[in-house]
Amino acid sequence: MVESLSSYQSGFFSGLNDWTPELDKLARENLALGNFLANGFTTEDAELSLLTAEYPIYPPNTLTDGGNTHFAGYRAAKDSVVSAYAANNYDSYFLTTSDLEFSSTGEWADALGFETVHGSEAKFYEGWPRYHFDAAPDAALVERIIDVIQGATVPTLIFAKTASSHHPFVAPDSGIRSEEQVIRYVDRQIGALYRHLSEAGFFETGHLIVLGDHRAMRPLLGQEVDRYGYEKAYTQIPAVVIGPVLAPDSKRVDTQFSQVDIANSLVALADAKACTSPIRGMIWGENASAPKYTLHRRGDHRNQFSVFSGERLGVVTLNGDRTHFEGADFEENEAADIVQFLNFKRVQADAANSQQ
């Protein structure tokens, strides 16, 4: 999971910039999800969606000014990608160079059941320069991932999140303050990881998924709005799947999927059964299908969720008993169900939060 990796930075995914040639080459040669959405606007939102298949719908009155919630309502999540693979005797690692105390990330990763949780405090990163969040550069994380894979003796699940491309943008290899230079640096690390794994024969049985956590926290470009529409432009991130089972052929899929669907699809692989719903899809396999609705927790209006359904756009405004839905072409019962779902998840999260 790559910090702030956004579709507008990629020639392959948007055509607006050409800052990610390594990623774009992998996208052309493997499975590229060309209409892929982030489910929220923070890293925390992405972690929740990618590891639990839950939307980032938090209890009332838990958001900080920065949008963080410290995983309120989900700190005791029992069903997750981690638990699904643990049941199949996988080792599991949560790896980052970032400070695990930020947003209670380390505590939450431990609660999810990761056997090993390493952040900026890990001895492996001693001697590396440090940047925001006390994080060593992404090159160090690449070395750590390789180190874990080389030492693995049983099937292993690794969740790795980068930090170098977090705002403010400072390129670790040059010190230049430039979004383009930072993204180009990050792109080179993606390429280096792929080449090492490929040369080591990893992809004979192993898989690598590369994707963003959220669109970069920068103002929208006019070209993005023209291409995607205002609301959807805030959601667009790249996603590439590499490996012999999930991506045996080069293919671009422009069906709308999101981070929640990645988690749901991974759990289905572990459980050997496909479970879909109107809000959770399946990306690969014979039962591949898109969800009917995809939600995105908005960063521009913190009390709103965007709802995407095909070409339809809806917006839910959270306001207690006055929570309401706006959107053309939605049936009245659809709007009521969506509002009811969001209210239920908020109440459920609130109850869970009060017990922690």
Image (cartoon, rainbow, N blue to C red):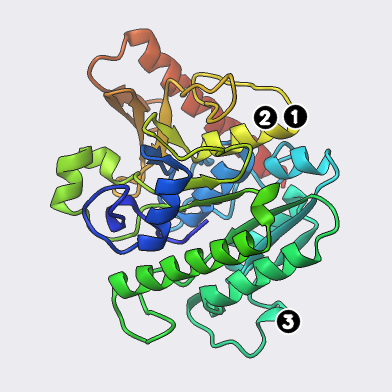
Picture layout, residue 221 above or below residue 226: below
Q: Please give the name of the residue rendered at 71% of the width and 77% of the height, measured from the top-left corner.
A: 122
Q: What residue is shown with label 1?
A: 271
Near mark 3 (Cα within 10 A), the count class, few <14, some 14-19 or many ≥20, is few
Picture layout, residue 341 above or below residue 119: above
Location of residue 233 by image quarter: top left
First in sequence: mark 1 vs mark 3: 3
Q: Give residue 150's position: percent from left, percent from top.
A: 76, 66
Residue 183 appearing in the image: yes
Mark toward the viewer: 1 or 3 = 1
Viewer-nearest residue: 206 or 235 = 206
The kind of residue tagged 2 is Ala
Viewer-nearest residue: 19 or 43 = 19
Q: Please give the name of the residue rendered at 55% of the width and 39% of the height, measured from the top-left corner.
A: 247
Near mark 1 (Cα within 10 A), the count class, few <14, some 14-19 or many ≥20, is some
Left or right relative to 115: residue 289: left
Q: What residue is shown with label 2?
A: 268
Q: What residue is shown with label 3?
A: 123
Q: Secondary structure at mark 2?
A: helix
For the residues labelled 1 and 3, say whether their Cβ atoms are less than 8 Å apart: no
Q: Secondary structure at mark 3?
A: helix
Q: Secondary structure at mark 1?
A: helix
